[in-house]
Image (cartoon, rainbow, N blue to C red):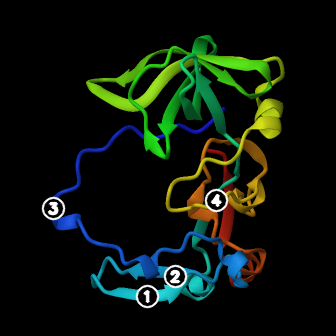
Amino acid sequence: MMSAIALDAPAWPAAYEFDLPAELVTPDPPEERGAGRDDVRLMIAERSSTRIAHRRFADLSTLLDPGDLLVVNTSATLPAALDAVADDGTTLQLHLSTHLPGDLWTVELRRDGEPYSQSPGRLALPGAAHVHIHAPYVRGRHRARLWLASLHLDTPIDRYLFDHGRPISYGRVPTRWSIDRYQTIFATEYGSAEMPSAGRAFSHELVTRLVSRGVGVVPLVL
């Protein structure tokens, strides 16, 4: 089972809009800069005092107390992005999302990194495979960026994706990193269309320190 991409959210209020300086955007994994996975920034918000503190993720072992419980997602990332070509020659990127009953899928279409809102009908995929785009995916009253589609492959889906796919990424990450850069240290069961990013900053050393401190770790597959 693959994890679903969230539906479109309402527009952000103007109060939450801000400009992010280019020098604060980090498109590369910390390992590529010679740092550790846990050598990234961590913001701490205290509910009781509303105090905000800026730390490093590696400090988490000093911020949690013995008896605290850490629930981690063990889902592994699939290379769920595929190159696709419409009958008129339009080149698109197909992002797989969720496998539905009836062997249907929800998928996202992109062109040059932006969502693609026209139905292309049939798309050719690598390896002589193809996909039929049937209709927009509508949930309740909301029209998502997703489409209902059926895949026509000659190999099982996991094998096909590892033969022809790549990890889903977006414009802020211009480099195509290998699939291992999109896995957490907890990954045991393939299923996530996109990286379970909340767990990426954990390192084996950090988890060892947390367990030694008496913090419990419970696995959960999402």
Task: Classify 10 Å Cα crowding around label 2: few (below 14), some (14-19), many (20 and above).
Answer: few
Task: Determine contact: label 4, label 1, CB under 8 Å.
Answer: no
Task: Classify 10 Å Cα crowding around label 3: few (below 14), some (14-19), many (20 and above).
Answer: few
Q: Residue furthest left?
A: 14
Q: Earlier in the sequence, mark 4 or mark 1?
A: 1
Q: Earlier in the sequence, mark 3 or mark 2?
A: 3
Circle 3 is placed at which residue position? 14
Circle 1 is placed at which residue position? 54
Q: Is residue 139 above or below residue 104?
A: below
Q: Residue at x 77, y 74 (%)?
A: 204
Circle 2 is placed at which residue position? 41
Which residue type carries mark 2? Arg
Q: Earlier in the sequence, mark 2 or mark 4?
A: 2
Task: Determine contact: label 3, label 1, CB under 8 Å.
Answer: no
Residue 5 visible in this rendered orientation of the protein = yes
Q: Earlier in the sequence, mark 1 or mark 2?
A: 2
